[in-house]
Amino acid sequence: MNNPKVYLVVFFIRAMYAGLHITSKAALNGGMSAYVFVLYRLVLATLFMAPFAFALERKAAPPLPFKLCFKIFLLSLFGVTATMIIYAVALDYTSATLSSAIMNSIPVVTFIVAVTFGQETIKLKRLSGMMKVSGVLLCLAGILEMAFYKGPHFKPLNHHHLLGHGNRETNHPPTNSTKTWVLGTFLMTISNTTWSLWMVLQEPLLKEYPSKLTFTTLQCLFSAFQSFFIALALERDFSRWKLGLDAGLVSVIYCGIIVTGVAFYLQSWVIEKRGPVFLAMSTPLTLIITIMGSYFLQGELVNLGSVLGGLLMVGGLYSVLWGQRREQIDHNTPTEVERKASLDVKENGITQV
């Protein structure tokens, strides 16, 4: 249960997602279409994952009936395609720091979804239950704070940026910055909600189809087809479909191979080992790495509101985590009746099989 490999893998997953925020924002700042960006990312991920899935699991993978295939298709539609597109649009409206900060709502939302599906419990009359509720409220306060309060900016120390487009919060004119910032914040929250639902619903599907590489490849393949038709409908300027030797190409390669390919597989592995809530609880690591990376590599203007909102959500996150840990301790601690029964068994010399 306390396998150190799980913690190491989780750290690498969070570092990969920090790179996702930074490189994606650089690509969008360079003028790349959010819809086309998601499409290319999914196509590249599919091409990267398919050979590994075929080589390693073609004999071991169980049969895939139509009903299960359709379930994976639907899971891909709202859990991968919708999440990625909404996230890309929201990131275009906000900043890499805010996107990583607001990701701290994922554990709380995942917990709420897990409670809804009966995978987690909450007891309001106990301290653990009250801490969980407090965590949800802190998370909500953090989202609202980031949406409606920016505050002063922290000036970048480095003025030579590897990914270019420094000192930019969004691509949009200053007159629309407040509206787009608020809209982007709530779109990011919606994206996190669909992502949380994806993590929870993925667990029972993995029990039906335990071949994780094939499972991940199928999701990428289905989402690539779905995002193609969405991009075709929403992005009619075909000049924005072109890839050049710039941050857009770097981001597509990184997000397609490292994030959508490798990280998706590693997430499935962690969810199988420790469950979706455990994976979600590691989210604050992404905020720390992203702030450092976007500040020094992009020269992004980190505002006080994003930092304070992120801290509120981290507080909410660990409030829920503390509540869960307390429930585990209470569950594993024998009650007075159980201790007395155990003592009677020992005194009477009864052996339990």
Image (spheres, helix red, strand yellow):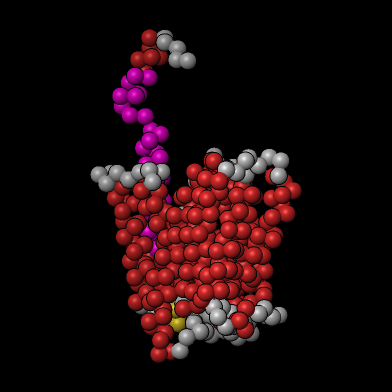
Q: Quadrant of the N terminus?
A: top right
Identity of the residue drawn at 46% across and 78% down:
93
Look at 40% across and 86% down and name the residue there.
176
Q: Is residue 307 visible?
A: no
- x%, y% of residue 75? 50, 54
* Residue 142 in which image quadrant: bottom left
Identify whether 88 is placed above or below 14.
below
Q: Which span of residues is magenta-colored?
A: 313-342
Horizontal side, residue 273 vs residue 173: left or right? right
Q: Residue 311: x, y in percent?
A: 41, 66
**Relative image position of residue 329 (x, y in whole percent):** 40, 39
Residue 232's place in the image compared with 211, above or below, is below
Residue at 49% of width from left, 64% of height from top? 82
Taking the magenta stretch, the answer to whether it contains residue 181 is no
Q: Nearer the viewer, residue 313 or 201?
A: 201
Residue 323 part of the magenta segment: yes
Q: Residue at x 49, y 74 (%)?
A: 89
Of residues 210 and 296, the one nearer the viewer is: 210
> Among all residues in the image, which is located at the extreme left?
125
Q: Main secondary structure of the magenta part?
A: helix
Total numbered circles:
0
Q: Position of residue 71 (x, y in %)?
A: 51, 49
